[in-house]
Amino acid sequence: MADTRTTATPPQNLSGISRPGRGMQVVKPKNLKGTLKRLWDLTTGKRKGLGLVLLFSAFSSATAIISPRLTGSIITHISEGDTITTLLLLLAGLYVCDWFVKFMQQFLMAAIGQRIINHIRQELFGKIKNLPLRFFDKHQHGELMSRLTNDVDNISTTISSSITLLMTYSFTIVGIFTMMVMLSPILTLVTLCSVFMIFVLTKVVTKHTRKLFREQQKNLGILNGQIEEGISGLTVVKAFGREKQMEEDFDRKNENLTKTAIRALIWSGYLMPLMNVINNICYLAIAVISGLLYINGNLSDIGLISTFLLYSRQFTRPFVEIANVYNNLQTAVAGAERVFEIMDQEPEPVDKPDAKELTNTRGEVEFRNVSFGYDTGKTILKDISLKIPAGKKVAIVGPTGSGKTTIINLLTRFYDVTSGSIYLDGTDLRDYRMGDLRNVFGVVLQDTALFAESVKDNIAYGKEGATLDSIKEAARAAGADAFIERLPNGYDTVLEQGGMELSQGERQLLTIARAVLSNAPIMILDEATSSVDTVTEQKIRNAMLKICENRTSFIIAHRLSTIRDSDIIILIENGRIAEKGSHDELITLNGKYAEMYRTQVG
């Protein structure tokens, strides 16, 4: 899911770091304090050097406080005819030190921030890989990717810049205010008036801009959805001649976004110029009032005037910057809450303390009074009882939504039964070690999952340490070796697009070769021929027959011609076993299966 936030032109700040424009929509966290504490606890041991960064923040603030005072002293010495060489060298040295301190501050904070984010990203990804399939069924993949990338990046930006800026600005405000009060309470009061005016101005402007940026974000999301639908469904668009309608929809949504963005940027553009006007008025007022005070003898040091003018410039800006940094902090903490929502999810069931090791699997499977529903109150499978002898080939058929794939999900423990039990070789699946249980199954799914690696690595995905000879043997058994040899680099050809450069049938043959290489005692083939032509279907069927020999196998299929030679055919309807038997027995029964078969084969 793309990050759709929009930023105005970033203003400059004391540290030289650019940040999102003012007036943007701020995503507020539900529990700011609690989430910050949890982030702090999560990063224990990864914050080495943070104390030094805070010390550098204090030094940076000291430079902002001392340099105007030195400048004023230089002006005073010039007016009195004194030498200023030492003061100039001191001021130059102070600026060089300030550059070095800020460089080291950002250097250290970048390292600390990335180290912390690396840790958070590892923790989150480690959690995601251990979550049950139920979680992924209820969350869009794009949303999960957004949490792993955009939300974590928001945290990274905040850690790398916002924390140090908050500390630097806080030190600067306190130090400059103290110096101004010591120098002139009257001029300090004038400066505070300008701060109050800027505060009111910011509140008024951001009240409008946040609404506009929220609307802009909404329109941007709509436009992104239009683009995604248009690109992914371009074949359908062209097939039905809807290019003009698609372009008109895009133009309309793009125009809405443009109008909203213009209004938002115009309103946000008011802030900085008006702030500059207020600062200039304040600057002028301090100059006039301090001049009058000097003429009347209330100020004896002419350099104090320039000192105060510099202080007034530096005093007003941090207030607005702190508000902006705080808004960024809130958005980042809201992202952290989304990250913690995943971390708080229940992982897959852990092995029992006395979990059994699964070795020498025969492949006898039994369902005893199994019922299951993905959601409470909605039962998919209802009181399924079934015993499959070892080495039998079982086909599961039935209408869409009847519960065919659900049986496989329960058998592999992607889900646990709601009631009843499933036994493998006489032992409840839940009593085995999960890793051992998953290794018992070789799986070929309808959606082929290939990776941006070489062909041989994709075949050997489930068999660590497989030799090239064994990989080639598996490919030959699956009928995939012929097209693999025609690839540019044969088995070393890298699938740059994750297999999209291959045909659907070729991708499916690779996944079958992967299952062959796994040499698992139980095979599961879920709609392996649903998206291929009849010639490729026959190749896949032949490969399926080979890998199912002498092992328990479960085949889910809509094309009934591919499962005629199965030992047992089970018809699932409305979550129950409606018919069971061999192909000939079910044809003789002349029930639902016979009707489906005759419909398909004519």
Image (cartoon, grey):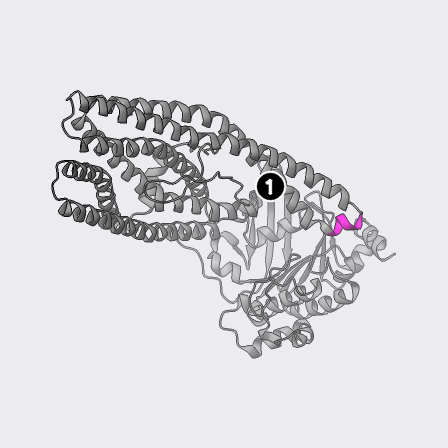
Residue occupied by mark 1: 373
Q: Residue at x 68, y 44 (%)?
A: 575
Q: Position of residue 550 (x, y in %)?
A: 64, 69
Image quadrant occupied by the N terminus: top right
Between 110 and 95, the residue placed more toward the observer is 95
| Local secondary structure at mark 1 | loop
Image position of 243 with respect to 388: above or below: above
Q: Residue at image x 88%, y 56%?
A: 602
Counting labels gives: 1
* Residue 237 included in the magenta stretch of the image: yes
Q: Badge 1: few (under 14), some or many (20 or more) residues near its Cα, within 10 Å?
A: some
Quarter occupied by residue 298: top left
Q: Position of residue 483 (x, y in %)?
A: 69, 73
> Where on the picture, by quarter, is residue 481?
bottom right
- Is residue 132 visible in this depiction of the protein? yes
Q: Is residue 213 visible?
A: no
Q: Residue at x 30, y 42 (%)?
A: 164
Image side of residue 305 versus residue 145, left or right: left
Q: Quadrant of residue 448?
A: bottom right
